[in-house]
Image: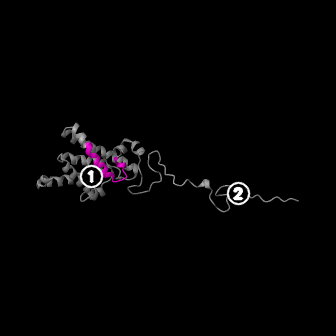
Amino acid sequence: MTISAPDQTVENSSVGRADGAVSEADVPPAGKPEEPDRSGVSPHAEASGIHSKRPTKVFIRSRLAYFIAFGGGAGLSSIAPGTVGTLATFPLFWIFAYFFDPLALLVLIAVMFLVGVWACGVTGRALGNHDHGGMVWDEITAFLLVLYFTPPIIVWQAFAFLLFRLFDIIKPPPIGYYDRKLRGGFGVMFDDLLAAFLTLLCLAAWKALGIGSLI
């Protein structure tokens, strides 16, 4: 009499396998990059911090406010986006100064400040970080104001750039105080406005003391 052997077939799944092994189909391909959602922001980004979400070109092009807040893309720089945004202000200022008279240019800077309050507020809420490092419209607007009052001499403008970046990075009083206390788009724009004021104050002091004649 023939006795049939017990069925040894095991389904190819992590549930059906007696040894608990995971099948090759269950393991995602190694090294596959995390894909962003339609907003251009990675869905599995870290929960907090300045780099909690990583905006892409797709993200900043999805809404006008994002595009403005990121300075047309200057804020996407992986290295010192604030410095990149400030550097981008130079050609922007030269173009504006060519096409606008002084009063019109000053009005334009004021309008840019107001637009920045709106754009940075909207973008900060979207990113879950009210002062994301990629938002550089505040640096652009504030440094435009600095260049407006700085002598149109490359050495003066270079010193203005260095001073502005120094104040914007170390945030001495009262910049640091308002940076901590103020939130939203106005807070983002206002602390850079204070950095611009301190920069111009230093340049004015140098000029009054005759140091300007040496450079």
Most frequent secondary structure within the magenta stretch: helix
Local crowd size for mark 1, using a 10 Å CA cut-off: few (<14), some (14–19), many (≥20) = many
Relative side of 161 to 81, left or right: left
Q: Residue furthest right?
A: 1
Q: Can you identify the residue that label 2 sits on?
A: 10
- CA gap, disc 1 to disc 2? 66 Å
Any magenta on residue 194?
A: no
Question: What type is the residue that disc 2 sits on?
Answer: Val
Upstream in sequence: badge 1 or badge 2: 2
1 or 2: mark nearer the eye? 2
Q: Which stretch is magenta? A: 74-92
Q: Is residue 208 above or below residue 65?
A: below
Q: Is mark 2 on a helix, strand or loop?
A: loop
Q: Position of residue 171 (x, y in %)?
A: 27, 58
Residue 205's tag is: none
In the rendered image, the residue lying farthest to the top is: 99
- Expressed as whole percent of the image width and height from the top left, the position of residue 62 reads 41, 42
* Closer-to-camera residue (3/132): 3
**Placement of the N terminus among the 4 image quadrants:** bottom right
Q: Is residue 66 left or right of residue 12?
A: left
Judge left or right: residue 28 versus residue 63: right
Q: Residue at x 42, y 44 (%)?
A: 58
Depth check, front residue: 183 or 211? 211
Residue that mark 1 sits on = 192
Residue 126 position in % (x across, y down): 40, 48
Which one is in front, 153 or 124?
153
The picture places residue 47, in percent across and down from the top left corner, at 44, 56
Vertical position of residue 50 compared to residue 117: above or below: below
* Residue type, numbered disc 1: Asp
| SS under mark 1 | helix
